[in-house]
Image: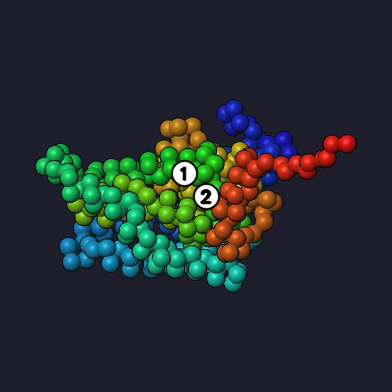
Amino acid sequence: MDGVRVGKRMIGTQSPVTIGWENIPKVEGSQLKRFVFTWFQPFFWFAFIAFWYYAPNSLATASTGLTIGIGFRLLLMALEWINPRFESWQITWKEFVTDLFYVGLGYTILRIVDSYIGSDVLIKVMQTHFHFESFKWFTGLPLLLQAFLIAFIFDFGQYWMHRGMHNWYPLWLPHSVHHYITQLNVNKGAVGNPVELFLIGLGVGGFFDFVPRAFLLAGAIGGVGAYQHINVRFNSPRWWRFLFNTTEHHSLHHSQDYEATRSNYSGSFIFIDRMFGTCIDGEAELLGMEGGRRMSIPEQMTYPFTEGWKTLKEKFGRVSTVAVPAE
């Protein structure tokens, strides 16, 4: 494959990719269908921000956010059947059961572990030693600006954590499991080795829970990350795809082309990638590693450890020599 030059890199020499928005297929059909799949994402983004901004305190709670999140995820799953991006990504029972396992893992075991050793524990310790009087400048900012700063700080940290996972082998081992997925759908963000899922969940966003309304608003602003793993074809407005990470961006990051995977690291704000020269606009259908080999759940659980052990043996193991008696 010849590939396409993007900056100093050649993208698509190992697997087919589409580079440039002008080359990405558009939603076809009736005028209503094209309207819906053009403005669906901006409409709900503004709607959620407006809800958390104006909702009474009795509704502006974490439990309300959880309920809305589950309902919205079910809506996105329905859209995947109505207007799939790729037929090859349509979910099967095997994929559904795998996704369900990881979603359940995230809401149970990983949440329990995080409550003992996660970033929230460290944040609570920090908060006990902080004088919140020194944060009056922050609480005095307009509410929406507070929320944006919280979302940006969290995603900025996520960008460097994710980029580090692709550039330092000990972090790549647990993260590599997530790159064995061969399709994107709304629950695929939950699939990965538990070590990686724990690491990617670390962040300082929880430090700002002393401004609960801004904290909930930040979740709405950064909630565009839900579209990363989704099998829906959208006609995203130009300003949207300039600012936010889209399925197109993330499919390139998961492609079978090595150079393409070293791009689009941010979780929500693709302009962070644009700032550091790691953004590539385009999409890919063929995803995964090793030619699209699918991992079983047991292998996903053990792969970082077995592969790490193999690497250590190759690096430090000594080849045994057989003593030859002298004649």
Q: Picture coordinates of residue 140 (x, y %)?
A: 14, 42
* Residue 202 or residue 268, whichever sits in front: 202
Q: Picture coordinates of residue 90 (x, y %)?
A: 59, 64
> Is tag 2's residue or tag 1's residue first in the polypeptide sequence?
1
Disc 2 marks a residue whose amino acid type is His
Q: Which mark is residue 75?
A: none
Q: Residue at x 59, y 41 (%)?
A: 260
Q: Picture coordinates of residue 244 (x, y %)?
A: 42, 45
Height in image: 8 above or below 88? above
* Residue 239 or residue 56, whichever sits in front: 56
Q: Residue at x 57, y 29 (%)?
A: 7
Q: Residue at x 43, y 47 (%)?
A: 267
Name the residue beneath numbered marker 2: 175
Q: Picture coordinates of residue 175 (x, y %)?
A: 52, 49
Q: Residue at x 28, y 53 (%)?
A: 121
Q: Secondary structure at mark 1?
A: helix
* Residue 22 or residue 8, whichever sits in front: 8
Q: Residue furthest top?
A: 8
Name the residue beneath numbered marker 1: 162
In contact (CB < 8 Å): disc 2 and disc 1: yes
Left or right position of 217 against 202: left
The residues tagged by marks 2 and 1 sit, at their Cα atoms, a distance apart of: 9 Å
